[in-house]
Image (cartoon, coloured by chain):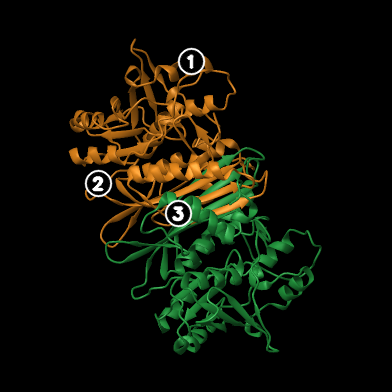
Chain colours: A orange, B green
Amino acid sequence: MENVITLAHGSGSIQTSELIDKIFKSNFDNPYLTADDAAVLPNDTGKTAMSTDGFIVSPYEFPGGNIGKLAVCGSVNDIACMGAKPKFMTCSYIIEEGFPVEELEKIAKSMGDTARKAGIQIVAGDTKVAGKGQVDKIFITTTAIGDIVEGVNTSGAFAKPGDKIIVTGDVGRHGCTILLARNEFNIDADITSDCAPLWNNIETVFNETKDIHVIRDATRGGVGTVLYEIAHQSNVGISLESDKIPVDPGVRGVCAMLGLEPLYLACEGRLVFFVPAEVADKVVDALRKCENSEKAAIIGEVTDENKGKVILNTAVGARTILSRPSGELLPRIC
Amino acid sequence: MENVITLAHGSGSIQTSELIDKIFKSNFDNPYLTADDAAVLPNDTGKTAMSTDGFIVSPYEFPGGNIGKLAVCGSVNDIACMGAKPKFMTCSYIIEEGFPVEELEKIAKSMGDTARKAGIQIVAGDTKVAGKGQVDKIFITTTAIGDIVEGVNTSGAFAKPGDKIIVTGDVGRHGCTILLARNEFNIDADITSDCAPLWNNIETVFNETKDIHVIRDATRGGVGTVLYEIAHQSNVGISLESDKIPVDPGVRGVCAMLGLEPLYLACEGRLVFFVPAEVADKVVDALRKCENSEKAAIIGEVTDENKGKVILNTAVGARTILSRPSGELLPRIC
């Protein structure tokens, strides 16, 4: 491991996992420390999910949202992925001296609106101000808790050979939006972030079946990174049909120009489900009736072979290994 | 209200309250949004306390602790003040590219050690890395939850005329330590931060009596700010005996040199209790038997007159109003 923190340590990549294992896991060791999106904690009558996320996205406002909306969606979706109905949230602000109060008000309004939409109540907060140049405009950390629906038991470690893999919509929109919002490439495209709270989508699926093995939101590192993580956690192979993966034409165009793989661009409103084959169609049908998952699709399945690998099958019959990016493609995306 | 965020908005002062009222309260409005150190939330069998705090202290290492120890103590003490036994914690790191991994390891070790001492388990986390110059070294946000002890009902709004006011030790040590650690004044003094987790102290008091009206930790803004907040929340007056307030001779010396009031310097290991007069001696005796509260003392009482004011009575019989500082005395103290 390197001696100093690099952008790669914050990318959600192999380097991030290494940092967590070597520095945090060993020092915080306890039976509830999570390797999933949220910790699963005992309460007096069942289980609670708890998750925290820091948001440092730059620019803090982008087509389709801002750092406030993102901060609510991020933590809501993390606990929702563990099967928890969002209940309470805290938020902590670190703001640069000189930040316009009007902008802060806009961000707070977004948070309030998104929280109400997500059915979560913001119950406590903290505000710190750092001097000019000591923080880049505004950072927000949110923490969410919620009770896990009875009978639900999901984890990145529960994928099984034969499971169908479902994605709830087109991939890579958030990452592509932030990339363009930075104006570094002089590309003009009408792309907005997919940022959205997703508990309603998950609850709709639970109303059909609770026999769901894995639910994950494909944020930092995109769907590709999430699939590799699950392949490792569950010690299985993953086989994808590349022509089944929904990609917005605008995103596809930008990716072609810049040589990027949409599967590795962040989403902030997309879920990946691993479900037994016999319930897959029912789950897709349910998702397609919900806002933000109208384009849900089965994109592949879990295999016993190629353990730890994600294989891409193209329409013309070629099979390739989805190559894993190393380092930080695009920092400060969320 | 000003148009831009100033350091004063992060000082825990009147400006901070104004910001919270105007920007956050109105947008997050819900019945559980707290004005105390932690939100009090219903669970299936009782009440849970939940609190979050962001830590941006500079320097991140100081005599008596570092940002990691501080981040654990801060949130533990906030829920403990609502009568909650610490249970689970999350932490979110925002780290500057180039930060030494060895330093991060030291901070994580401190957090693990302090969490074990405080009886809380760190169950989930998040790591973000910002580019060089986009964050000053390292910021940590922690969020703690715990179940409130049955029969306990404390709030800053529950102070009553006749209550005795107890402080658990000498005041202003943390603020003074950070001031000196910045080396801006060229003062050499042997002062260490009082930073400590305080649930044990509170639990010891509950073992004697649960008839406690207010518990607060005197962090940002010090004991003086906490007393003013309680005077307002409870609509009462506060009368202090200035010669009863414990102050370390080193802290007193530094304050005299720099013209500072120790009551307004931050503590990170001191509690303020408001208790009915008849249990005050019992509470002090219990506290004096605990680590970190050996010098607990009754420093004053709640009055029906002088509502919203803190009055200082000196040993020679003079009575003055404790003047309220405005703006930010010392930024990035916690």
Q: Which of labels 1 and 3 is toward the front?
A: 3
Position in image of residue B223 (x %, y %): 59, 72
In the picture shown, does residue A170 fall above or below B198? above
The residue under label 2 is A152
Position in image of residue A272 (x %, y %): 33, 33
Residue type of the residue flagged with mark 1: Ala
- Tell me the tag on residue B25: 3
Rate crowding at label 1 as few (under 14), some (14 to 19) or many (20 or more) other CA atoms within 10 Å. few
Residue at the extreme top: A316
User: What's the residue at 42%, 25% (across, down)?
Assistant: A263
The residue under label 1 is A256
Q: Which of labels 1 and 2 is toward the front?
A: 1
Classify mark 3: helix, strand or loop. Answer: helix
Q: Tell which subunit mark 3 falls on.
A: B
Classify mark 1: helix, strand or loop. Answer: helix
Pointers 1 and 3 in contact (C-beta within 8 Å)? no
Please name whichever residue, B316 or B244, is drawn nearer the observer in this view of the structure.
B316
Q: Tell which subunit mark 1 falls on.
A: A
Rate crowding at label 3 as few (under 14), some (14 to 19) or many (20 or more) other CA atoms within 10 Å. some
Question: Would you say B31 lies left or right of B285 here?
Answer: left
Position in image of residue B327 (x %, y %): 65, 59
In the picture shown, does residue B80 fall above or below A199? below
